Amino acid sequence: MELLITLFFVGLSSQFIGTLVGSGGLITFPAMLLLGVPVHSTISANKLSNAISSTTSLITLVKQRKIAVSDILKGGPIGLIAGVIGGLITTSIPEPLMKTIAIFLLVFVLVLSFVKPNEASRNSASKNPKGLMPIYFGIGVYNGAFGPGQGSLLMHFLSRKGIDYLKTIGLTRANTLASGLGAVVTYIFSGDMIWSVAFAITIGGIIGGQIAIFIAPKMSKKVVHHLMRVVVILLIIQLLGENLIRGILS
């Protein structure tokens, strides 16, 4: 029982951070592994939690008219297919390689966050900027296969398209939902899902996501960008540390 209560608070804190600035996995993954949850069960429970908490966050944002249902549906099928593909390749690509890929992607995003966007493209950003589908697909595959940093990656790319912060949250949650559901299907069939663990993480995640949606409108763009950079830096440090420890032990 104590384990499930702890996992509840892990889910709450991770989805709170993940909804606001992405990379809630920075909290979830090391915490669940330290609590003795097997790595593939950690990934599968996290995907289910992300998908369900993303659904509740999206419902709130749609009600507030911060994102349209049509925007969610456009990227939904791409994200779902990407998540299934990501889930399927998890068993064929070693975890250390996935973490190495994640490090390079996050370093790229960190550098990109300090480069000022073209002002013309920012001012002329349409309601539905072009070139999003390949980004949705690539990040969706990564989320289905591994995940940490998925939210930060997508939020950075969307913000550089000149998209409003709350809509950025909505589009990121939509990608997390679709790719997460696709991955969950593969993990259920593989037998990696521990339902009690997934349930505790998910309930906490729903509450954490709703708290974040309530706070998000009160956050300035400058604070958001700084928080996103801090989270990305911490995630890079975490992944580098894990790779370094694995190298020493081997």
Image (tube, rainbow, N blue to C red):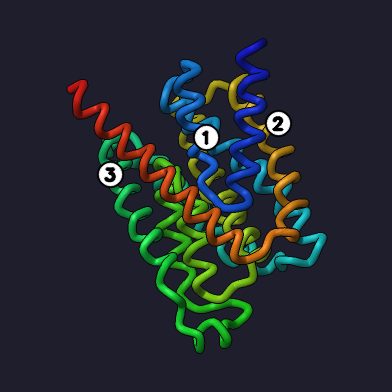
The residue sitting at 75% across, 59% down in the picture is 218
Marks 2 and 1 close (CB-CB < 8 Å): no
Tag 2 residue: 203
Tag 1 residue: 27
Q: Which corner quadrant of the image does residue 135 belong to?
A: bottom left
Nearer the N terminus, badge 2 or badge 1? 1
Name the image quarter holding the C terminus.
top left
Q: Nearer the viewer, residue 19 or 172?
A: 19
- Nearer the camera: disc 1 or disc 3: 1
Q: CA distance from mark 2 to mark 3?
A: 31 Å
Residue type, numbered disc 1? Ile
Residue type, numbered disc 2? Ile
- Nearer the camera: disc 2 or disc 3: 3
Q: Answer few, some or many: residues within 10 Å of disc 2's Cα (few below 14, many 20 plus, some between 14 and 19).
A: some
Name the image quarter holding the N terminus.
top right
Callout 1 secondary element:
helix
Q: Estimate the x, y position of residue 82 in percent, counting from the top left.
A: 44, 53
Q: CA distance from mark 1 to mark 3?
A: 19 Å
Callout 2 secondary element:
helix
Q: Estimate the x, y position of residue 236 in percent, counting from the top left.
A: 37, 45
Residue type, numbered disc 3? Thr
Taking the image as shown, residue 142 lies to the left or right of residue 48, namely left
Callout 3 secondary element:
helix
Residue 106 at least partly seen: yes
Q: Identify the disc placed on residue 100.
A: 3
Q: Which corner quadrant of the image does residue 8 belong to?
A: top right
The residue sitting at 52% across, 75% down in the picture is 161
- Residue that sits furthest to the top in the current view: 1
Q: Answer few, some or many: residues within 10 Å of disc 1's Cα (few below 14, many 20 plus, some between 14 and 19).
A: some
